Image: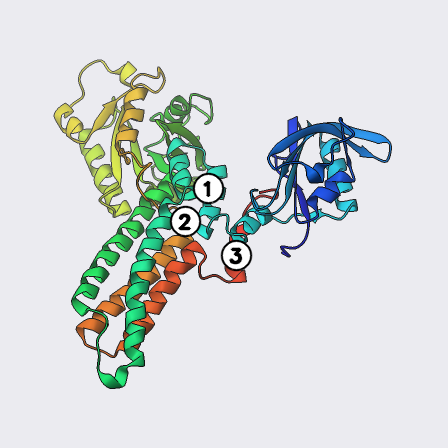
Amino acid sequence: MNIEDDICAISTPAGIGAIALVRVSGKNSMSIVKKVFRPAENTIDIGKQKSHTVHYGFISKSDEIIDDVLVSVYKNPNSYTGQDLVEISCHGSVFVQQEILKLLIDNGARLAKPGEYTMRAFLNGKFDLSQAEAVADLINSYSQSAHKVAIRQIRGGFSNDIKKLRDQLLEFSSLLELELDFSEEDVEFANRTKFKNLLSNIKEEIQKLIDSFSVGNVIKNGIPVAIVGKPNVGKSTLLNALLNEEKAIVSEIPGTTRDIIEDTIVINGYSFRFIDTAGLRDARGKIESIGIEKTYQKIEQASIILYVVDINETPLEEISRNVADFKEHIKDKTKKIIVIANKTDLLVEAPKGFKNLVEMETIFASAKRKENIKLITESLVNSVLKEDISNTTIITNARHYEALSKALVAINNVETGLKNKISGELIASDIRNALHYLGEITGEVTTDEILNNIFRKFCVGK
């Protein structure tokens, strides 16, 4: 990507809509637009207008009017990309959008590559790399919790935390480097006691960020909830009731669901990804066997398991045995199993072992009649993070997680080096490694490979 090129792209989603937005950025963007834009007021020169002004007129090809449009002017450095930038708001016709793009390309612009506008914003110092990545997270956020995390990162919450850690390390690193220059005189500029306390604090902060990734990953991608149980206990009916639509096939014939069915809904700002699985029983055929194998895979991957039973036909001993079996498969004590005692509409008397069922956090429901579905959704929400995350730094990016993990290893090496009284040169080397990995997060240390890998995941036009 050549930052000196003039680029253009459609910034609104593909397809037909009321309006579309075509964006042009680069040092010649004003003159390129002037060639195709005819202002309603003939005396207006787009290139001489103030920044952040909007002008009505027509896009034309020779004497043929393509569309009437609004042109927004943004002068550098006060634009999204930090360059001269023009946004053309036109009607949402696919033909109109493509004709405007062709005219811009014919007059000197080239089609932008994925993420190129945001990359230019980063390279021109509009925000750092972690903030640039948060732009993509904000675009892709489909729940309140994901939106809050992305907004905090765009506003620099995470960046400020990393910058603070890096500045503290950098100060002591400079003193250690100074000691190396006076190594023959055996002087000590960096107070080792203060340095050890600083390292302890930095380790604690980095570990908090690393630990937050498990929560952040769930917020970003949705909380996986596996719906499991024997055939014909009402799993698909429960899924349909939770989603409030006929997503899964419902039949009295056991084994109807032979593959995994997934869908996502947002409850109280959190995204839940429901997974309706094949019924657990001795498989009666190769296809059903594969489905049951996938069920156990989903049990391992899920954060919450809704174990559905027919309360009229399932003995307490079987429920207890299966709950223990699920716990053995998931091997993670933080994951939650909620027993759904289904088909209460057919219940004629209190189920045996009622007290034991209550202790297992059982919800008695009728998926068919949609009774107590709200109790299930409330239990799901109570199973996840409930605190206000708007002022909490949570990482959602695997690249950040990897960089922080490597920085923590480097900090541990520094601590070990101080304890074993190794040479200042080796300690300084480990500090430089920690600074490098922290710098990778914000873009203070970067490579073309990292940048290309990040921005190619963006949509064209952003």
Mark 3 belongs to which amino acid? Leu
Q: Counting other residues with Cα less than 10 Å from the Cα at mark 2, is it few (<14), some (14-19), or many (20 or more)?
A: some
> Alpha-carbon distance for marks 1 and 2?
9 Å
In the displayed structure image, the side of residue 133 where residue 391 appears, left or right:
left
Q: Element type at marker 1?
A: helix
For residue 451, the mark is 3
- Residue 385 location (% of width, % of height): 28, 36
- Residue 163 location (% of width, % of height): 36, 54
Q: Element type at marker 2?
A: loop
Q: On the rendered image, what quadrant is the C terminus found in?
A: top right
> Alpha-carbon distance for marks 3 and 1?
16 Å
- Residue at (54% x, 48% y) in the render: 121
For residue 366, the mark is none
Q: Are marks 3 and 1 in contact (CB under 8 Å)?
A: no
Q: Element type at marker 3?
A: helix
Q: Nearer the viewer, mark 2 or mark 3?
A: 3
Give the colour scheme shown.
rainbow
- Residue at (39% x, 27% y) in the render: 239
- Residue at (21% x, 70% y) in the render: 416
Of labels 2 and 3, earlier in sequence is: 2
Residue carrying label 2: 397
- 235 or 159: which is nearer to us? 159
Residue carrying label 1: 137
Q: Are marks 1 and 2 in contact (CB under 8 Å)?
A: yes
- Residue at (39% x, 53% y) in the render: 400
Mark 1 belongs to which amino acid? Asp
Mark 2 belongs to which amino acid? Asn
- Residue 312 location (% of width, % of height): 25, 21
Image position of 266 with respect to 163: above or below: above
In the displayed structure image, the side of residue 350 where residue 213 appears, left or right:
right
Q: Quadrant of residue 252?
A: top left
